[in-house]
Image (tube, helix red, strand yellow):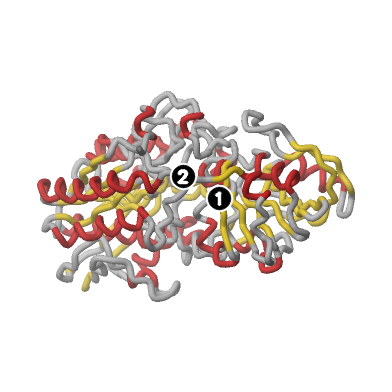
Amino acid sequence: MAFPLTFNQRIQIKSQKNRLQNVCFGLPMQKRICFGAVMKIAVARFWYEANSFSPFTVGMAEFRAREWLRGDAVGSAFRGTATEIGGALEWADARPEVELVFSRCASAPPGGPVKQELLDEIVAEIAGDPLFHDVDGIYLSLHGASLGTESLASEEEIVCRLRACYPETPIVASFDMHACPTQRMVAALNGAAVYRTYPHIDMAETAVIALELLAQNITGEIRSSVLMQRINKILPSFGMRTAPGAPMTEVVHIANEQVSAFDGVFAVCPFASFAYADTPAANAGVLVTYAERSAAERAAAAVCRKMVSLRKKFTPKLRAASEVLQSRPWDGGKRIAILEPSDNPLSGGGGDTPGLFKAALDMGVPEGSVFAFFNDSALVARAAESGLNSQLDVALGGQLDRRFGAPVAISVYVEKLTMGRFVNAGPMEAGRPTELGPTVLLRSGPLRIIVTSAAQSPNDINYFTLHGINLEHVPVLLAKAKNHFMAALGPIFDRVIQVDTLGPAMANTYALPFQHVPVERFDLS
């Protein structure tokens, strides 16, 4: 049975339908390999990003609402989705010689640290799963920036415990661009792949890279290790979109060049780290999968030099929310999206800070504008009890945490109630179900306000369709979002502006009480 390897030196995506057939970076083209028997690969997943300054910790309810699966249920949930597991399933479907078996697959929306008892349960279940006893290789889908209420390196614990149990079994992992990998974890891997796009629309492709590396290690075509080199800096994500001319795009380009420049180097994957994870491992750098150590060191050094040379371009330059709103950027009929990244749930925000909302009330916005969103399950329940078209006096924001501002008192009308369920249209995580919990759409003067029962970034068109909102007719959208917003919703607006407010993911990291990250890592001067 022929084993087709699909990598050259860059990504080519011709259409959403055939994206996986056209992933072309990361691994040099090798000769086709023939297998005489089934290749059995075990898959486990722990995908969580923790903001140390989030107003809440995360428990089982958040994981069950998003992803708490194992066995055959994993394939049923993920087939056809633009996710790592979706990519793994499509990769295996094209190869009759490959069998995937699934251990625990768990993820939750970003937030605060995971409750330690639950984190210990997840680590123990994956690391001690007898499923791994009779497999040829292990693929781990890891975000790379999880934290517990006590532990600071749970992914390291998973990988190292598996390596101790299975010293000869190839283990490969995929990571988010904002991972915080440790040297001990990296030393236990045979290969690593990292998202190359931000917004992260290449999750499925990243899994394919990891699985191709794993397959080559299983068959003995290569026997690889992973090298990590870091720059003692954390690159803020505000300006990290991989758009043409952007600094991260240049870094990814240099990384891709190293694969063709050096024999014995199979994948070169830069990562920026996560600026709100208070862990010693928060530190940008590069992961190189290699067979030739000296070549890997040279490749890593080239990428790190590029990161250091471009560091100043990653410095966020955001204007205050009140200043932006006072300038009335919508004048002349322009349709504007104003983003509040300091409370972006995909950076660990809680959907609770009042800064942008208060500025909008103080400065005024055009009729038909929308604010998305506040996370307040108690208010949703109160609105549901009051009923459609009822009037309520409410306090918005500052319900979970008043460090970043006091609640804003306002009178509203209840316009729409929903159960908060939709399927992502994509491109990011296309086909994946999303649970907001029960929601309410409120109206106050010219502004409609979405209130949810869970903190989920408003990055998908169906988030708004659920609430009867056609974004084509919205003059100003105020959203607790960041760069991922651009994948689906950026093209809808004439201009997208990120503004600065107080919050757990604010631009001024110096104002946050870090304990484990040296302050010099935030100095990009």
Q: Where is residue 191 in the image (x, y as percent from the top left)?
A: 24, 50
Which residue: 50% across, 55% down?
Answer: 484
Q: Where is residue 56 in the image (x, y as percent from the top left)?
A: 59, 33
Give the residue pinned by disc 1: 498
From the top left corner, tell me how far across and down residue 310 is, in percent.
Answer: 32, 48
Please state if 454 lies on the left or on the right of 249 as rendered.
Answer: right
Query: Do residues under tags 2 and 1 come within 8 Å of each other at their CB atoms?
Result: yes
Q: Residue at 22% across / 48% down in the picture?
A: 190
Foreground residue among 214 and 475: 475
Q: Name the residue under label 2.
A: 316
Name the amino acid type tagged 1: Gln
Give the amino acid type for the residue marked by disc 2 in the picture: Pro
Q: Residue 365 carries which label?
A: none
Element carrying mark 1: strand
Image side of residue 215 versus residue 463, left or right: left
Q: Check disc 2 and report its element: helix, strand or loop.
A: loop
Report the quarter where the N terminus lies: bottom left
Q: Foreground residue, 39 or 243? A: 243
Measured in 3D between alpha carbons, the distance from the residue under mark 2 to the one under mark 1, in whole angstroms, is 10 Å
State the image quarter where residue 34 is shown: bottom left
- Quarter of the image that includes the C terminus: top left
> Is 168 left, or right, of 519 in this rendering?
left
Q: Residue furthest right?
A: 390
Figure check: 232 above or below 44: above
* Relative horizontal placement of residue 249, taking residue 167 as reference (left or right): right
Q: Would you identify the image quadrant in which residue 415 lies?
A: bottom right
> Is residue 13 in view from this perspective?
yes
Q: How many marks?
A: 2
Residue situated in front as seen by the camera: 494 or 125: 494
